[in-house]
Image: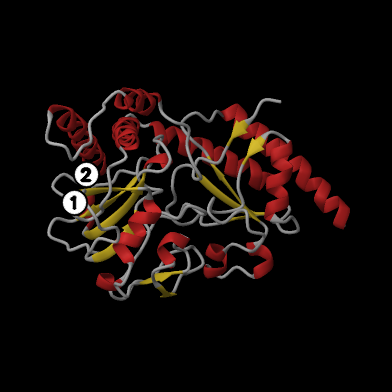
Amino acid sequence: MARTYLDFNATTPLRSEARAAMIAAMDVMGNPSSVHAEGRAAKGLIERARAQVAAALGAEGADIVFTSGATEAAALACAGRGLVCAGVEHDAVAAWCDVTLAVNAEGIVAVGDPARTALQLANSETGVVQDLPEGLAVSDLTQGFGKLPIAFNWLGVEMGLVSAHKLGGPKGIGALVVKRGVEVPPQIRGGGQEMGRRAGTENLIGIAGFGAAAEAAARDLDNGVWERVAELRNTLNQALSAIGFNTISVGNIARRLPNTLCLIAPGWKGETQVMAMDLAGFAISAGSACSSGKVKASRVLRAMGFDEVLSGQAIRVSLGPQTTEEEVLRFAEAWGRDYRRVLARVA
């Protein structure tokens, strides 16, 4: 059976540019902290990747601190700062904050004091995009990076979180983006790498792949790739909505990521939908990849005001540049066929 991958918000295929950069980095022997020629060659690769990520983010002049991923970057940015956030934040951020901010039915967060707030740019489950207030302490940019035009230098944010594997880079590498002059106490201490903010020998291979992927992602964005993806998402949304049965398209009034559709199917549990579509050859999810394996209602949808039952009947379909119209229409047909069977059994 041919498989169709529709879970790009969970992770993305490795870009050819990233793979080539990583293979080349494998032959660079030196430790980036060594002062000899071999060490300087390794350091040069890291600084090149740092510049590539900064350019793709519009963060020239900011500090790019490489980490093991956005989760570590969140801990580095948020730990011990007494920040507040909303229930729609990713667990990696919410774990360090007081979850007290209100969210409306469209997923928009009400921010009181930006200097004490962590607020995501875009939600991984619903795709809802926030308007970031000036002076925001921390923003999770992970889902927006590579899909939306971002200029960190114009966002007015102190720190941002990004991850390579969400835009075609390798897993296990991310970065904390820090406005120049902002203090970030290190959580991992030792050799003073990464401007003293994250000790430990750098993941040279992962960093090289991240840089190449960020550069390629920025090029795709400039070339209008995600506008085509948005058209496909809208086609899928219309096809699924036309099936009827009182389905709910979450966040479709708000501004959304171009590739993301969150759909509630009353009477059909989200995890059951995921299993049914997996058997039909389609990879989708029932929420964030970091929590979808847990059989419980979506915390994001609960924060938006949906009840426990409806929050447990949602799926997320997230498209990518490789997705075709044929694939989304085949998915809509398979999903509709199975949903009719479910409703027939409970009628």
Q: Could you tell me if the residues under marks 1 and 2 are in contact, i.e. CB atoms within 8 Å?
A: yes
Task: Report x, y in % for residue 205.
Answer: 33, 33
Is residue 106 left or right of 152 when viewed as pictured? right
Residue for badge 2: 58
Whether residue 107 can be seen here: yes
Which quadrant holds residue 135? bottom left
Amino acid carrying mark 1 in the image: Asn
Question: Which one is nearer the viewer's eye here, 12 or 175?
Answer: 175
Is residue 79 left or right of 180 when viewed as pictured? right
**Residue found 30% across the figure and 27% down from its top:** 25
Is residue 218 left or right of 319 when viewed as pictured? left
Please identify the quadrant where the N terminus is shown: top right
Please identify the quadrant where the C terminus is shown: bottom right
**Colour option used:** secondary structure
Task: Report x, y in % for residue 166.
Answer: 42, 42
Task: Report x, y in % for residue 203.
Answer: 32, 40
